[in-house]
Image (cartoon, rainbow, N blue to C red):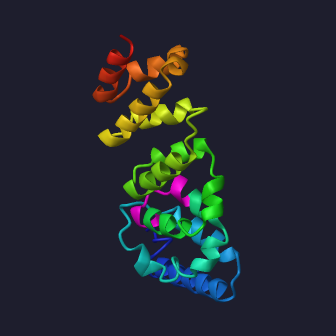
Amino acid sequence: TSRIAYSNKTREYLHNRADKTLEKLGEENNPDYVKMAVSILLKYTDADRFLRNKYRHIFDYPQLWEEQPEALLKLLLESKYIRVHEFAVTRLRNCDKFLASINIDTIIKLINQSYEVTQQLGLELALKKYDSSKPNKSLILCFANFPYKRIRKQAHKWIEEKRNYFLEDSSFIAGLVTSSQSHTRQFASRFLR
């Protein structure tokens, strides 16, 4: 007969032990708290509804999280759990200097996440970083392919403002013409006339 190698009791014990360790690290202001919490959080998805019940201290100690904003960014880029995205965006909003340092490629990754809270943060950062004297074509294509019409309209406005600059780039034009968004394909058709 086979025996269960990992019972529910064992799982519960390990969760409780990890939660106590998190609490201890947090109380000691130990930066390892964030490392441990990130490794736990990245294992959960939207299908796991009861994370808060298993790890009572996983979202505690905001000062420790805000001292390591790169860990919050990692959660936004890798997590598949809405509660984690909501938490990380809330904490990151208190890290202005770090937010200002995020590059355009990373901002595009934030915009392309599945969670609206993370997309919104990415869009806000993109609007702050946009440089009309040197438009970033990848960012504009990201906006042009975004599901929300107002964001696509912003991309179309930027493209029209620098018409000749964009017309010189055939791969950019191909990106517009083959857009997943019909609104952008229609814009491309008018733009090329």
Residue numbers of the magenta segment: 75-84
Residue situated in front as seen by the camera: 59 or 165: 165
Please say whether residue 31 is one of the residues in the magenta stretch.
no
At 51% from the left and 65% from the top, the residue drawn is: 88
Q: Position of residue 67 (x, y in %)?
A: 67, 72
Horizontal side of 176 relative to 100 (left or right) equals left
* Residue 113 against residue 73 in the figure, above or below: above
Residue 98, placed above or below residue 135: below
- Judge whether residue 81 can be spotted in this image: yes
How far across and how far down the image is residue 99, in percent? 60, 58
Q: How many marks?
A: 0
- Does the magenta portion include 82? yes
Q: Is residue 126 above or below residue 54?
A: above
- The residue positioned 45% from the left and 79% from the top of the image is 54
Residue at the image point whose x is 39% and y is 33% from the top: 145
Identify the main secondary structure in magenta: helix
Quarter where residue 184 is shown: top left
Splitting the image into 4 quarters, where does residue 25 fall?
A: bottom right
Query: Measured along the vertical axis of the image, is residue 128 above or below residue 193?
Result: below
Q: Position of residue 32 (x, y in %)?
A: 69, 75
| Residue 148 visible in the picture | no
Residue 1 point in image, percent of width and height = 43, 68
Q: Closest to the observer: 136 or 111?
A: 136
Kindly give the residue lying farthest to the top in the view shown. 193
Residue that appears at 60% across and 64% down: 96
Q: Quadrant of the C terminus?
A: top left
